[in-house]
């Protein structure tokens, strides 16, 4: 069933384990050309920053429950998404290579419980920075950056986490240039990445050093949106005509910019467990992508 | 222990040459190998240039200034708080004990990679009074987010 056949209120309503839905009508949020170039309607789900293995009861005393709730909520949707993408930091980092692999395998096993017909994964710095993605690739296979097409939309996964430095690197930028070459300027493109490509807050490590080079390449295309994680809360910003949209974390929230002097993990709220945690569905209709934030609380 | 010196010009100089530098034209600052010493390449004009706190017209040929030693160890800098007088020039001598940490002062668009077991130097321009956030910007492990420091200039 295509998404446009759904009752809108049903789609946006509370699902399964609940959670408020915040539908974003954002300037420049992926108004992808004419409907004729937009392909079919569909929706996908973004799960980010699972940090499996995280252990700080003051911030999240139910760390194993968070991911289970998110998966159950996705499975409870009246119509399943075409795919679920996990946008990095699947695991909490560790110096122990065996433990890193064990955590990655557990995430993979839990994700297998999703009803959605397809899942896509890529690494965050917690998964990949300390071993250049070796464990991640061992468990999930594939590549650290890749692209795929879905119903007329070109998805590009960019890796800005598999080195200690927050960079894409020249080789990947060359790959991006080649991947974009020959695509019509109006072709709809969605970039999936972990860190913000733009300098959101370098003082909080919320930036990609050479992200502007990627943005420059993408800017030649008129219909581009970027969905990312890393900052553990919803944030929307434009660079030119490109919208950048961060998602909430499934495991712990971080203080939004301007609310704290230093980056801070927000404490657990006993009165509202799972507050600040969530996931996102991205509704693709009539050539426009609209993110809907779904809260775990 | 062999030391490497990396001299950076002041922010005013950077502002004047930013577009060239950011385009990756290969301009080298000071005498150090450019591969080990770079500035941020910010997009979106998120940080002001030219009128920033280091706009005293300081030049790289004015000397390295006072040396200030700093040790980087997972997951802290020691000392955590650095102090300087307004307008004073500093050379940060940063020794890493265990990892290629980064040392970054985003507001000044200055950063450097450390090298385990070695000391690297970062020459700062004369600064206006204020608090400057510093951080390790190479992900170094679970405590990476706590690896921060503050540069206090003047009476701040």
Image (spheres, coloured by chain):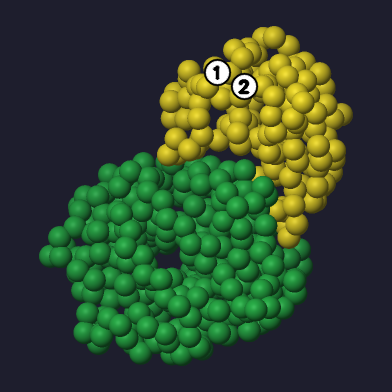
Q: Residues within 10 Å of mark 2 (few under 14, many from 20)?
A: many
Q: Is residue A143 above or below residue B61?
A: below
Give the mark nearer the N terminus: 1 vs 2.
Answer: 1
Total tally of numbered discs in the picture: 2
Chain letter behind tag 1: B
- Where does residue A60 sit, x and y in percent of width and height? 69, 74
What residue would you read off at disc 1? Answer: B12
- Of A42 and A22, which appears nearest the observer? A22
What residue would you read off at disc 2? Answer: B54
What letter labels the chain drawn in green? A
Pointers 1 and 2 in contact (CB under 8 A)?
yes
- Where does residue A255 sit, x and y in percent of width and height? 61, 58
Location of the C terminus of chain A by quadrant is bottom right
Q: Are marks 1 and 2 on the same chain?
A: yes
Taking the image as drawn, is residue A99 in sight? no
In the rendered image of the structure, the colour used to display chain B is yellow
Q: Residue B95: give its label.
A: none
Location of the N terminus of chain A by quadrant is bottom left
State the SS at label 1.
helix
């Amino acid at each position: 069933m295509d998404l446009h056949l759904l009752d809108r209120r049903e789609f946006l309503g509370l699902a399964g384990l609940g959670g408020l839905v915040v539908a974003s009508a954002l300037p420049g949020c992926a108004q992808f050309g004419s409907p004729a170039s937009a392909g079919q309607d569909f929706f996908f789900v973004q799960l980010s920053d699972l940090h499996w293995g995280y252990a700080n009861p003051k911030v999240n005393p139910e760390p194993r429950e968070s991911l289970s709730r998110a998966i159950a909520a996705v499975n409870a949707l009246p119509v399943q998404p075409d795919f679920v993408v996990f946008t990095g930091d699947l695991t909490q980092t560790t110096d122990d290579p065996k433990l890193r692999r064990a955590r990655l395998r557990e995430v993979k096993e839990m994700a297998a419980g999703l009803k959605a017909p397809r899942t896509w994964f890529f690494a965050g710095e917690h998964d990949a920075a300390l071993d250049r993605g070796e464990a991640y690739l061992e468990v999930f296979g594939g590549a650290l950056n890749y692209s795929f097409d879905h119903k007329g939309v070109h998805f590009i996964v960019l890796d800005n986490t598999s080195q200690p430095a927050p960079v894409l690197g020249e080789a990947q930028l060359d790959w991006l240039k080649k991947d974009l070459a020959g695509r019509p300027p109006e072709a709809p493109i969605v970039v999936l990445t972990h860190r913000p490509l733009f300098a959101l807050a370098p003082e909080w490590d919320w930036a990609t050093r050479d992200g502007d080079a990627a943005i420059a390449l993408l800017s030649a295309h008129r219909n581009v949106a970027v969905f990312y994680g890393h900052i553990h809360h919803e944030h929307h910003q434009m660079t030119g005509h490109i919208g950048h949209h961060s998602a909430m974390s499934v495991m712990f929230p971080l203080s939004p910019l301007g609310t704290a002097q230093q980056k801070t993990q927000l404490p657990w709220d006993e009165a509202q467990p799972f507050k600040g945690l969530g996931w996102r569905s991205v509704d693709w209709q009539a050539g426009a992508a609209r993110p809907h934030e779904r809260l775990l609380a | 222990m062999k030391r490497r010196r990396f001299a950076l010009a002041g922010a005013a100089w950077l502002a004047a040459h930013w577009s060239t530098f950011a385009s990756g034209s290969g301009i080298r600052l000071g005498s150090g190998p450019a591969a080990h010493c770079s500035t941020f390449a910010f997009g979106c004009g998120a940080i002001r240039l030219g009128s920033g706190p280091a706009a005293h017209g300081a030049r790289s040929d004015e000397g390295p200034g006072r040396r200030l030693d700093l040790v980087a160890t997972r997951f802290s800098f020691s000392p955590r708080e650095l102090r300087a007088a307004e307008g004073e020039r500093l050379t940060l001598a940063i020794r890493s004990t265990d990892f290629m940490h980064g040392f970054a002062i985003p507001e000044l668009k200055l950063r450097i990679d450390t090298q385990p077991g070695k000391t690297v130097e970062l020459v700062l321009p004369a600064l206006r009074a204020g608090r400057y956030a510093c951080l390790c910007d190479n992900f170094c492990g679970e405590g990476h987010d706590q690896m921060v420091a503050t540069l206090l200039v003047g009476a701040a």
